Image: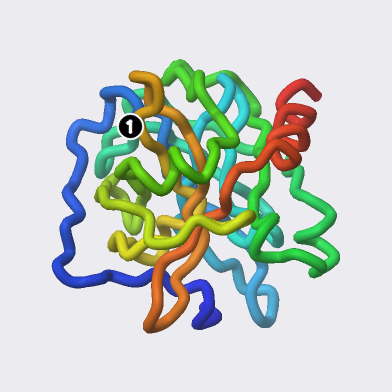
Amino acid sequence: MHPALEALVFPPDARRRVTPATGEPFRYVCHLMTVSAGPGGVQQRRVGTGTLIAPDKVLTAAHHVRNAQFVSVAPGKDGASEPFGHAMANRIDMPREFLDGSAVAAYDFAVLTLTRRLGAGHWRHVSALPDRVLSSNPVSVAGYPRDHLYVAEGLLTGVRPEQLEYRIATETGQSGGPIWLTHDGRPTLAGLHRAGIPGRFNAGVRLTSRKLLMIRSWVRS
Protein backbone atom coordinates (compact mmCIF):
# COMPACT_ATOMS: atom_id res chain seq x y z
CA MET A 1 0.00 0.00 0.00
CA HIS A 2 1.15 3.52 -0.75
CA PRO A 3 2.62 5.11 2.43
CA ALA A 4 0.10 7.96 2.27
CA LEU A 5 -2.69 5.42 2.68
CA GLU A 6 -1.26 3.59 5.64
CA ALA A 7 -3.26 3.89 8.84
CA LEU A 8 -1.40 4.88 11.99
CA VAL A 9 -1.60 3.54 15.52
CA PHE A 10 -0.79 6.37 17.93
CA PRO A 11 0.29 5.31 21.44
CA PRO A 12 -1.44 4.59 23.64
CA ASP A 13 -3.60 2.40 21.42
CA ALA A 14 -7.03 3.00 22.96
CA ARG A 15 -9.04 1.02 20.43
CA ARG A 16 -11.44 -1.56 21.79
CA ARG A 17 -13.08 -4.49 20.08
CA VAL A 18 -16.84 -4.23 19.63
CA THR A 19 -18.44 -7.60 20.31
CA PRO A 20 -21.13 -8.29 19.49
CA ALA A 21 -21.42 -5.60 16.82
CA THR A 22 -25.21 -5.60 16.71
CA GLY A 23 -25.92 -2.46 18.75
CA GLU A 24 -26.43 0.97 17.22
CA PRO A 25 -24.57 2.51 15.48
CA PHE A 26 -22.07 -0.35 15.19
CA ARG A 27 -24.52 -2.52 13.27
CA TYR A 28 -24.33 0.02 10.43
CA VAL A 29 -20.57 -0.51 10.06
CA CYS A 30 -19.74 -3.02 7.33
CA HIS A 31 -16.87 -5.41 6.74
CA LEU A 32 -15.89 -5.21 3.07
CA MET A 33 -14.00 -7.90 1.20
CA THR A 34 -12.85 -6.73 -2.22
CA VAL A 35 -11.42 -8.86 -4.99
CA SER A 36 -9.38 -7.19 -7.71
CA ALA A 37 -6.92 -8.23 -10.39
CA GLY A 38 -3.30 -8.02 -9.30
CA PRO A 39 -0.05 -8.39 -11.27
CA GLY A 40 -0.30 -11.12 -13.87
CA GLY A 41 -4.04 -11.31 -13.42
CA VAL A 42 -3.74 -12.95 -10.00
CA GLN A 43 -6.71 -12.09 -7.81
CA GLN A 44 -6.03 -10.00 -4.73
CA ARG A 45 -8.32 -9.90 -1.71
CA ARG A 46 -8.41 -6.93 0.66
CA VAL A 47 -10.38 -6.09 3.77
CA GLY A 48 -11.97 -2.66 4.06
CA THR A 49 -14.78 -0.86 5.85
CA GLY A 50 -17.99 0.88 4.86
CA THR A 51 -21.15 2.12 6.54
CA LEU A 52 -24.83 1.74 5.65
CA ILE A 53 -26.59 4.97 4.67
CA ALA A 54 -29.69 3.21 3.26
CA PRO A 55 -30.87 -0.42 3.39
CA ASP A 56 -28.98 -1.23 0.18
CA LYS A 57 -26.40 1.59 0.00
CA VAL A 58 -22.96 1.64 1.60
CA LEU A 59 -20.63 4.63 1.88
CA THR A 60 -16.94 3.73 1.76
CA ALA A 61 -13.50 4.94 0.61
CA ALA A 62 -13.14 5.23 -3.16
CA HIS A 63 -9.52 4.06 -3.11
CA HIS A 64 -10.62 0.74 -1.62
CA VAL A 65 -13.11 -0.13 -4.35
CA ARG A 66 -11.88 1.73 -7.44
CA ASN A 67 -10.49 -1.35 -9.17
CA ALA A 68 -12.64 -3.95 -7.47
CA GLN A 69 -14.10 -6.80 -9.49
CA PHE A 70 -16.23 -8.01 -6.59
CA VAL A 71 -17.17 -6.47 -3.23
CA SER A 72 -18.85 -8.45 -0.47
CA VAL A 73 -20.49 -6.44 2.34
CA ALA A 74 -21.37 -7.75 5.82
CA PRO A 75 -22.70 -5.33 8.47
CA GLY A 76 -22.05 -6.10 12.13
CA LYS A 77 -19.59 -8.89 11.30
CA ASP A 78 -17.90 -10.38 14.36
CA GLY A 79 -15.38 -13.01 13.40
CA ALA A 80 -17.25 -15.78 11.60
CA SER A 81 -20.61 -14.41 12.70
CA GLU A 82 -22.58 -12.35 10.16
CA PRO A 83 -25.77 -11.53 12.09
CA PHE A 84 -27.34 -9.63 9.18
CA GLY A 85 -25.90 -11.77 6.40
CA HIS A 86 -24.00 -10.30 3.48
CA ALA A 87 -24.61 -8.96 -0.01
CA MET A 88 -22.58 -8.18 -3.10
CA ALA A 89 -22.19 -4.75 -4.64
CA ASN A 90 -23.55 -4.52 -8.18
CA ARG A 91 -22.83 -0.82 -8.73
CA ILE A 92 -20.14 1.61 -7.56
CA ASP A 93 -20.48 5.39 -7.84
CA MET A 94 -17.60 7.74 -7.03
CA PRO A 95 -16.83 11.41 -7.66
CA ARG A 96 -15.28 12.66 -10.87
CA GLU A 97 -12.79 14.61 -8.75
CA PHE A 98 -11.40 11.34 -7.42
CA LEU A 99 -11.36 9.55 -10.76
CA ASP A 100 -9.61 12.33 -12.67
CA GLY A 101 -7.11 13.00 -9.88
CA SER A 102 -8.06 16.63 -9.40
CA ALA A 103 -8.99 16.26 -5.72
CA VAL A 104 -8.22 12.70 -4.65
CA ALA A 105 -8.00 13.25 -0.89
CA ALA A 106 -11.07 15.48 -0.60
CA TYR A 107 -13.27 13.20 -2.70
CA ASP A 108 -12.06 9.76 -1.63
CA PHE A 109 -15.51 8.29 -1.13
CA ALA A 110 -17.87 6.00 -3.03
CA VAL A 111 -21.38 4.63 -2.72
CA LEU A 112 -22.00 0.92 -3.27
CA THR A 113 -25.41 -0.34 -4.36
CA LEU A 114 -26.08 -3.83 -3.04
CA THR A 115 -27.88 -6.76 -4.63
CA ARG A 116 -30.35 -6.82 -1.75
CA ARG A 117 -31.44 -4.83 1.26
CA LEU A 118 -29.77 -5.74 4.52
CA GLY A 119 -31.69 -5.69 7.79
CA ALA A 120 -29.11 -3.93 9.91
CA GLY A 121 -30.65 -0.45 9.66
CA HIS A 122 -28.63 2.56 8.57
CA TRP A 123 -27.50 6.03 9.59
CA ARG A 124 -30.45 8.39 9.99
CA HIS A 125 -28.37 11.49 10.61
CA VAL A 126 -25.68 12.27 8.04
CA SER A 127 -24.65 15.91 8.17
CA ALA A 128 -22.24 18.60 7.04
CA LEU A 129 -21.47 19.89 10.53
CA PRO A 130 -19.95 23.34 11.22
CA ASP A 131 -16.37 23.80 12.42
CA ARG A 132 -17.41 24.74 15.97
CA VAL A 133 -19.33 21.48 16.45
CA LEU A 134 -16.59 19.32 14.99
CA SER A 135 -13.78 20.98 16.94
CA SER A 136 -15.49 20.91 20.34
CA ASN A 137 -16.92 17.38 20.56
CA PRO A 138 -15.21 13.98 20.78
CA VAL A 139 -15.58 11.79 17.71
CA SER A 140 -15.58 8.02 17.26
CA VAL A 141 -13.75 6.20 14.47
CA ALA A 142 -14.64 2.56 13.76
CA GLY A 143 -13.53 -0.03 11.25
CA TYR A 144 -12.42 -3.53 10.37
CA PRO A 145 -8.66 -4.10 10.27
CA ARG A 146 -9.50 -7.81 10.01
CA ASP A 147 -12.69 -9.75 10.82
CA HIS A 148 -13.51 -7.92 14.05
CA LEU A 149 -14.79 -4.38 14.51
CA TYR A 150 -12.72 -1.88 16.50
CA VAL A 151 -13.55 1.63 17.68
CA ALA A 152 -11.67 4.47 19.38
CA GLU A 153 -12.60 7.98 20.45
CA GLY A 154 -10.90 11.34 20.79
CA LEU A 155 -10.94 14.98 19.79
CA LEU A 156 -10.11 16.12 16.28
CA THR A 157 -6.73 17.82 16.02
CA GLY A 158 -7.63 19.61 12.78
CA VAL A 159 -10.84 20.65 11.07
CA ARG A 160 -10.13 21.62 7.46
CA PRO A 161 -12.61 22.59 4.73
CA GLU A 162 -12.40 19.11 3.16
CA GLN A 163 -10.58 17.01 5.75
CA LEU A 164 -10.79 15.90 9.37
CA GLU A 165 -7.52 15.21 11.23
CA TYR A 166 -7.02 13.17 14.40
CA ARG A 167 -4.50 11.19 16.40
CA ILE A 168 -6.97 8.37 16.98
CA ALA A 169 -5.50 4.94 16.33
CA THR A 170 -6.52 3.03 13.19
CA GLU A 171 -5.10 0.20 11.12
CA THR A 172 -5.05 -0.67 7.43
CA GLY A 173 -8.50 -2.01 6.57
CA GLN A 174 -10.34 0.72 8.47
CA SER A 175 -10.43 3.05 5.45
CA GLY A 176 -14.04 3.88 4.66
CA GLY A 177 -15.10 3.50 8.28
CA PRO A 178 -17.41 6.09 9.82
CA ILE A 179 -16.40 9.14 11.82
CA TRP A 180 -19.28 10.25 14.00
CA LEU A 181 -20.19 12.28 17.04
CA THR A 182 -23.22 12.97 19.18
CA HIS A 183 -24.97 16.12 17.96
CA ASP A 184 -28.29 17.31 19.40
CA GLY A 185 -28.42 14.03 21.30
CA ARG A 186 -28.16 11.89 18.16
CA PRO A 187 -25.29 9.88 16.64
CA THR A 188 -24.40 11.85 13.51
CA LEU A 189 -22.16 10.70 10.67
CA ALA A 190 -19.70 13.50 9.82
CA GLY A 191 -16.93 11.86 7.81
CA LEU A 192 -15.09 8.74 6.65
CA HIS A 193 -11.67 7.53 7.69
CA ARG A 194 -9.30 7.70 4.75
CA ALA A 195 -5.59 7.48 5.50
CA GLY A 196 -2.64 8.08 7.75
CA ILE A 197 -0.17 10.89 7.09
CA PRO A 198 3.11 9.36 8.37
CA GLY A 199 4.45 11.05 11.47
CA ARG A 200 1.57 13.52 11.68
CA PHE A 201 -2.03 12.33 11.95
CA ASN A 202 -4.79 10.14 10.60
CA ALA A 203 -7.16 11.82 8.18
CA GLY A 204 -10.75 11.47 7.10
CA VAL A 205 -12.95 12.85 4.36
CA ARG A 206 -15.12 15.61 5.79
CA LEU A 207 -18.74 15.48 4.64
CA THR A 208 -19.76 18.81 3.14
CA SER A 209 -22.99 20.04 1.58
CA ARG A 210 -21.62 19.47 -1.92
CA LYS A 211 -20.52 15.92 -1.13
CA LEU A 212 -23.87 15.14 0.47
CA LEU A 213 -25.65 16.27 -2.70
CA MET A 214 -23.61 13.71 -4.68
CA ILE A 215 -24.18 10.97 -2.12
CA ARG A 216 -27.93 11.56 -1.94
CA SER A 217 -28.24 11.54 -5.72
CA TRP A 218 -26.59 8.10 -5.81
CA VAL A 219 -28.79 6.84 -2.97
CA ARG A 220 -31.91 7.88 -4.91
CA SER A 221 -30.73 6.34 -8.17
| Residue placed most toward the observer, 91 or 154 | 154
Judge from the rendering whether residue 111 lies leftward or rightward of residue 64; answer left or right. right
Q: Which residue is mark 1?
A: 26
Quadrant position of residue 91: top right
Q: Which residue is found at the position 50% from the left and 39% from the top?
A: 190
Q: Is residue 82 above or below residue 197?
A: above
Q: Residue at x 27, y 34 (%)?
A: 81
User: Taking 57 as reference, is 147 above or below it?
Assistant: below
Q: Nearer the viewer, residue 119 or 162?
A: 162
* Picture coordinates of residue 174, whole percent (x, y): 41, 56
Query: Where is 198 relative to 14, above or below?
Result: below
Position of the C terminus, as image quadrant, is: top right
Type of the residue with mark 1: Phe
Asked whether residue 130 is in view, the answer is: yes
Q: Position of residue 101 (x, y in %)?
A: 80, 69
Q: Residue at x 56, y 27 (%)?
A: 53
Residue at the (17%, 49%) spot, across then down: 16
Q: Residue 43 placed where, x, y %? A: 59, 67
Residue 48 position in % (x across, y down): 47, 54
Direction from residue 89 to residue 95 in the image, left or right = right
Q: Secondary structure at mark 1?
A: helix
Residue 46 in sight here: no
